[in-house]
Image: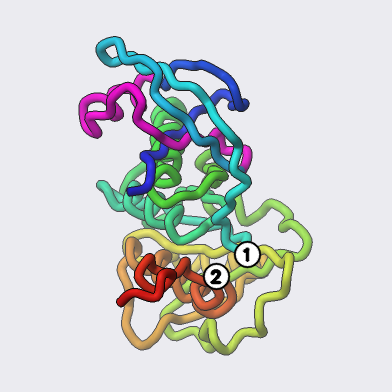
Amino acid sequence: MNSPRFYCQEALASGENLALPDDAARHAVRALRLRVGDSLCLFDGAGGEYAARIVSIDRAHVRVEVGAHLADERESPLAITLVQALQSGDKMDLTVQKAVELGVARIQPVLSRRSVVRLDGERAARRVEHWRGIVASACEQCGRNRLPVVDELHGLERWLAQPAAAGVRRLMLAPGAAHTLASLPAQQAGERIELLIGAEGGLAPEEMRAATLAGFVGVRLGPRVLRTETAGLAALAAMQCLWGDFMHCTPAPSPELATGHV
Protein backbone atom coordinates (compact mmCIF):
# COMPACT_ATOMS: atom_id res chain seq x y z
CA MET A 1 0.00 0.00 0.00
CA ASN A 2 1.30 3.49 -0.80
CA SER A 3 2.33 5.62 2.18
CA PRO A 4 -0.10 8.40 3.23
CA ARG A 5 0.89 11.80 1.83
CA PHE A 6 0.93 15.08 3.73
CA TYR A 7 1.63 18.64 2.60
CA CYS A 8 3.92 20.79 4.78
CA GLN A 9 4.10 24.53 4.16
CA GLU A 10 7.58 24.82 5.66
CA ALA A 11 10.54 23.81 3.49
CA LEU A 12 11.62 20.23 4.15
CA ALA A 13 15.12 18.72 4.34
CA SER A 14 16.40 15.20 4.82
CA GLY A 15 17.39 14.38 8.41
CA GLU A 16 14.97 16.83 10.02
CA ASN A 17 12.84 15.88 13.02
CA LEU A 18 9.66 17.94 12.88
CA ALA A 19 6.04 18.10 13.97
CA LEU A 20 3.34 17.54 11.38
CA PRO A 21 0.94 20.45 10.84
CA ASP A 22 -2.02 20.21 13.22
CA ASP A 23 -4.57 19.24 10.57
CA ALA A 24 -2.27 16.61 9.11
CA ALA A 25 -1.49 15.23 12.56
CA ARG A 26 -5.16 14.91 13.46
CA HIS A 27 -5.89 13.16 10.17
CA ALA A 28 -2.93 10.81 10.64
CA VAL A 29 -3.96 9.80 14.17
CA ARG A 30 -7.75 9.92 14.14
CA ALA A 31 -8.65 8.99 10.56
CA LEU A 32 -5.72 6.88 9.36
CA ARG A 33 -4.85 5.39 12.77
CA LEU A 34 -1.13 5.67 12.10
CA ARG A 35 1.30 4.51 14.77
CA VAL A 36 4.92 5.11 15.74
CA GLY A 37 7.16 3.54 13.12
CA ASP A 38 4.65 3.91 10.29
CA SER A 39 5.90 5.32 6.98
CA LEU A 40 4.48 8.36 5.26
CA CYS A 41 5.34 10.78 2.46
CA LEU A 42 5.83 14.54 2.84
CA PHE A 43 6.04 17.30 0.23
CA ASP A 44 6.41 21.07 0.52
CA GLY A 45 5.25 22.13 -2.95
CA ALA A 46 8.73 22.95 -4.19
CA GLY A 47 9.07 19.72 -6.16
CA GLY A 48 9.75 16.13 -5.28
CA GLU A 49 8.78 14.40 -2.06
CA TYR A 50 10.36 12.98 1.08
CA ALA A 51 10.08 9.59 2.66
CA ALA A 52 9.37 9.96 6.38
CA ARG A 53 8.67 7.90 9.50
CA ILE A 54 6.63 8.64 12.62
CA VAL A 55 8.89 8.76 15.69
CA SER A 56 6.42 9.91 18.37
CA ILE A 57 2.72 10.56 18.92
CA ASP A 58 1.40 12.63 21.82
CA ARG A 59 -2.38 12.80 21.53
CA ALA A 60 -2.89 14.64 18.26
CA HIS A 61 0.74 15.82 18.01
CA VAL A 62 2.87 13.78 15.63
CA ARG A 63 6.63 14.06 15.16
CA VAL A 64 8.33 12.56 12.13
CA GLU A 65 11.84 11.95 10.92
CA VAL A 66 12.37 13.15 7.35
CA GLY A 67 14.22 10.70 5.14
CA ALA A 68 15.50 10.74 1.58
CA HIS A 69 14.31 13.20 -1.02
CA LEU A 70 12.70 11.57 -4.06
CA ALA A 71 12.70 13.64 -7.25
CA ASP A 72 9.31 12.35 -8.39
CA GLU A 73 7.14 14.68 -10.47
CA ARG A 74 3.65 14.06 -11.75
CA GLU A 75 3.02 17.36 -13.53
CA SER A 76 1.28 17.66 -16.86
CA PRO A 77 3.32 18.88 -19.85
CA LEU A 78 0.49 21.37 -20.39
CA ALA A 79 0.66 24.63 -18.42
CA ILE A 80 -3.07 25.32 -18.17
CA THR A 81 -4.65 28.22 -16.29
CA LEU A 82 -8.33 27.63 -15.56
CA VAL A 83 -10.12 30.99 -15.59
CA GLN A 84 -13.28 29.96 -13.77
CA ALA A 85 -16.26 32.24 -13.19
CA LEU A 86 -17.46 31.99 -9.62
CA GLN A 87 -19.93 29.15 -9.11
CA SER A 88 -22.61 28.73 -6.46
CA GLY A 89 -22.72 26.31 -3.54
CA ASP A 90 -20.13 23.56 -3.46
CA LYS A 91 -19.60 23.62 -7.23
CA MET A 92 -16.53 25.84 -7.02
CA ASP A 93 -14.91 23.57 -4.41
CA LEU A 94 -15.54 20.55 -6.65
CA THR A 95 -14.15 22.33 -9.71
CA VAL A 96 -10.97 23.37 -7.89
CA GLN A 97 -10.41 19.87 -6.51
CA LYS A 98 -10.94 18.04 -9.77
CA ALA A 99 -9.00 20.60 -11.82
CA VAL A 100 -5.96 19.86 -9.64
CA GLU A 101 -6.40 16.14 -10.25
CA LEU A 102 -6.60 16.83 -13.99
CA GLY A 103 -3.25 18.62 -13.97
CA VAL A 104 -4.15 22.32 -14.09
CA ALA A 105 -1.20 24.59 -13.24
CA ARG A 106 -3.09 27.70 -12.12
CA ILE A 107 -6.63 28.71 -11.19
CA GLN A 108 -7.86 32.26 -11.73
CA PRO A 109 -11.28 32.77 -10.10
CA VAL A 110 -13.28 35.59 -11.66
CA LEU A 111 -16.59 37.27 -10.86
CA SER A 112 -18.81 37.32 -13.95
CA ARG A 113 -22.12 39.02 -14.67
CA ARG A 114 -23.98 35.73 -14.25
CA SER A 115 -22.20 34.55 -11.11
CA VAL A 116 -24.88 33.87 -8.51
CA VAL A 117 -22.47 34.25 -5.58
CA ARG A 118 -21.03 37.73 -5.00
CA LEU A 119 -17.81 38.02 -3.00
CA ASP A 120 -15.62 40.97 -2.20
CA GLY A 121 -13.14 42.18 0.40
CA GLU A 122 -12.57 39.91 3.37
CA ARG A 123 -15.10 37.31 2.24
CA ALA A 124 -13.31 36.94 -1.08
CA ALA A 125 -9.93 36.61 0.65
CA ARG A 126 -11.28 33.88 2.94
CA ARG A 127 -12.69 31.94 -0.01
CA VAL A 128 -9.39 32.13 -1.89
CA GLU A 129 -7.58 30.73 1.17
CA HIS A 130 -10.24 28.01 1.38
CA TRP A 131 -9.61 27.05 -2.27
CA ARG A 132 -5.86 26.98 -1.63
CA GLY A 133 -6.50 24.47 1.15
CA ILE A 134 -8.51 22.35 -1.28
CA VAL A 135 -5.60 22.49 -3.73
CA ALA A 136 -3.20 21.16 -1.08
CA SER A 137 -5.58 18.34 -0.12
CA ALA A 138 -6.09 17.41 -3.77
CA CYS A 139 -2.32 17.25 -4.30
CA GLU A 140 -2.02 14.95 -1.29
CA GLN A 141 -4.60 12.64 -2.82
CA CYS A 142 -3.49 12.62 -6.47
CA GLY A 143 0.29 12.50 -5.99
CA ARG A 144 1.28 15.95 -7.26
CA ASN A 145 4.28 17.52 -5.54
CA ARG A 146 3.87 21.05 -6.89
CA LEU A 147 0.85 23.06 -5.78
CA PRO A 148 -1.13 24.86 -8.49
CA VAL A 149 -1.48 28.58 -7.81
CA VAL A 150 -4.87 30.06 -6.89
CA ASP A 151 -4.89 33.76 -7.74
CA GLU A 152 -6.92 36.46 -6.04
CA LEU A 153 -10.52 36.91 -7.19
CA HIS A 154 -11.00 39.54 -9.94
CA GLY A 155 -13.91 40.85 -11.92
CA LEU A 156 -13.89 39.09 -15.29
CA GLU A 157 -14.02 42.17 -17.52
CA ARG A 158 -11.33 43.94 -15.49
CA TRP A 159 -9.16 40.81 -15.71
CA LEU A 160 -9.73 40.61 -19.48
CA ALA A 161 -8.61 44.22 -19.83
CA GLN A 162 -5.12 43.35 -18.56
CA PRO A 163 -2.46 42.66 -21.21
CA ALA A 164 -2.13 38.98 -22.05
CA ALA A 165 1.20 37.26 -21.51
CA ALA A 166 3.14 36.45 -24.65
CA GLY A 167 2.84 32.96 -26.12
CA VAL A 168 -0.44 32.02 -24.42
CA ARG A 169 -3.22 30.18 -26.25
CA ARG A 170 -6.56 31.54 -25.00
CA LEU A 171 -9.68 29.38 -25.26
CA MET A 172 -13.24 29.77 -24.00
CA LEU A 173 -16.06 27.26 -24.10
CA ALA A 174 -18.98 28.50 -26.18
CA PRO A 175 -21.85 26.32 -27.44
CA GLY A 176 -22.14 26.67 -31.20
CA ALA A 177 -18.55 27.82 -31.68
CA ALA A 178 -16.94 27.03 -35.02
CA HIS A 179 -13.94 25.25 -33.51
CA THR A 180 -13.52 22.09 -31.48
CA LEU A 181 -10.41 21.27 -29.50
CA ALA A 182 -9.49 18.61 -32.05
CA SER A 183 -9.72 21.10 -34.92
CA LEU A 184 -7.14 23.44 -33.36
CA PRO A 185 -3.45 23.22 -34.24
CA ALA A 186 -1.51 20.84 -32.01
CA GLN A 187 -0.26 22.32 -28.77
CA GLN A 188 3.38 23.36 -29.02
CA ALA A 189 5.97 22.54 -26.37
CA GLY A 190 6.20 25.33 -23.83
CA GLU A 191 3.00 27.02 -24.99
CA ARG A 192 0.67 27.98 -22.18
CA ILE A 193 -3.12 27.73 -22.24
CA GLU A 194 -5.77 29.88 -20.56
CA LEU A 195 -9.22 28.26 -20.48
CA LEU A 196 -12.19 30.51 -19.70
CA ILE A 197 -15.36 28.94 -18.27
CA GLY A 198 -18.55 30.84 -17.47
CA ALA A 199 -20.75 30.51 -14.40
CA GLU A 200 -24.32 29.19 -14.35
CA GLY A 201 -25.92 30.47 -17.54
CA GLY A 202 -22.55 30.83 -19.26
CA LEU A 203 -20.80 34.03 -20.23
CA ALA A 204 -22.88 37.13 -20.96
CA PRO A 205 -22.71 38.43 -24.57
CA GLU A 206 -20.71 41.46 -23.40
CA GLU A 207 -18.19 39.18 -21.67
CA MET A 208 -17.83 37.00 -24.75
CA ARG A 209 -17.14 40.07 -26.88
CA ALA A 210 -14.56 41.31 -24.37
CA ALA A 211 -12.95 37.87 -24.25
CA THR A 212 -12.78 37.72 -28.06
CA LEU A 213 -11.12 41.14 -28.15
CA ALA A 214 -8.65 39.85 -25.55
CA GLY A 215 -7.66 36.99 -27.85
CA PHE A 216 -9.88 34.16 -26.64
CA VAL A 217 -11.08 31.69 -29.27
CA GLY A 218 -14.43 29.98 -28.78
CA VAL A 219 -14.51 26.18 -28.79
CA ARG A 220 -17.36 23.73 -28.34
CA LEU A 221 -17.46 20.34 -26.66
CA GLY A 222 -19.90 18.28 -28.69
CA PRO A 223 -23.57 19.04 -29.33
CA ARG A 224 -24.73 19.21 -25.70
CA VAL A 225 -24.69 22.19 -23.34
CA LEU A 226 -22.64 21.34 -20.26
CA ARG A 227 -23.17 22.74 -16.79
CA THR A 228 -20.48 25.03 -15.43
CA GLU A 229 -19.21 22.34 -13.03
CA THR A 230 -18.93 19.87 -15.94
CA ALA A 231 -17.63 22.10 -18.72
CA GLY A 232 -14.19 23.02 -17.42
CA LEU A 233 -13.39 19.55 -16.16
CA ALA A 234 -14.48 17.94 -19.44
CA ALA A 235 -12.33 20.40 -21.40
CA LEU A 236 -9.30 19.75 -19.17
CA ALA A 237 -9.66 16.00 -19.63
CA ALA A 238 -10.01 16.42 -23.40
CA MET A 239 -6.86 18.58 -23.53
CA GLN A 240 -4.91 15.97 -21.61
CA CYS A 241 -6.08 13.34 -24.11
CA LEU A 242 -5.24 15.45 -27.17
CA TRP A 243 -2.04 17.19 -26.09
CA GLY A 244 -1.14 16.13 -22.57
CA ASP A 245 -0.19 13.06 -20.57
CA PHE A 246 -3.36 10.95 -20.70
CA MET A 247 -2.23 9.23 -23.89
CA HIS A 248 1.51 9.17 -23.28
CA CYS A 249 2.04 7.95 -19.73
CA THR A 250 3.54 4.50 -19.20
CA PRO A 251 2.01 2.66 -16.26
CA ALA A 252 4.16 0.61 -13.94
CA PRO A 253 3.81 -3.12 -14.64
CA SER A 254 1.64 -5.07 -12.22
CA PRO A 255 3.46 -7.41 -9.82
CA GLU A 256 2.01 -10.40 -11.65
CA LEU A 257 3.32 -9.25 -15.03
CA ALA A 258 6.68 -8.19 -13.60
CA THR A 259 7.28 -11.65 -12.18
CA GLY A 260 5.76 -13.57 -15.05
CA HIS A 261 2.87 -14.88 -12.92
CA VAL A 262 -0.73 -14.39 -14.02
Decide if residue 125 is in sight here: yes
Q: Is residue 149 left or right of residue 85?
A: right
The residue that label 2 is drawn on is 245
Please give left or right for residue 40 compared with residue 49 in the image.
left
Circle 1 packing at 10 Å, graded few (<14), some (14-19), many (20+), is: some
Indicate whether 191 appears above or below 92. Answer: below
Is 150 or 209 nearer to us in this picture? 150
**What residue is drawn where x is 63% and y is 46%?**
71
Task: Name the residue at 26% across, 24% down.
Answer: 29
Estimate the x, y position of residue 46 in percent, counting from the top left. 62, 38
Would you say 46 lies left or right of 109 here? right
Q: Position of residue 212 (x, y in %)?
A: 61, 71
Image quarter hosting the C terminus: bottom left
SS under mark 2: loop
Q: Are marks 1 and 2 in contact (CB under 8 Å)?
A: yes
Q: Is residue 165 above or below residue 233?
A: above
- State which region is magenta: 22-47
The residue lying toward the viewer, choosing from 148 and 27, is 27
**Colour pattern of the rendering:** rainbow
Disc 1 from disc 2: Cα separation: 7 Å
Q: Is residue 188 magenta?
A: no
Can you see residue 158? no
Q: Quadrant of residue 130?
A: top left
Which amino acid type is shown beneath numbered disc 2?
Answer: Asp
Question: From this viewpoint, which residue is outermost toward the top?
Answer: 58
Which residue is identified by label 1?
A: 77
* Within-10-Å neighbours for mark 2: few <14, some 14–19, many 20+: some
Amino acid on which disc 1 is placed = Pro
Q: Work out which residue is located at the far right of the displayed protein and give it.
A: 166
Q: Give how far across and how far down residue 18 sits, in percent.
A: 49, 16
The magenta stretch spans residue 41 = yes
Compare marks 1 and 2 and give the one earlier in the sequence: 1
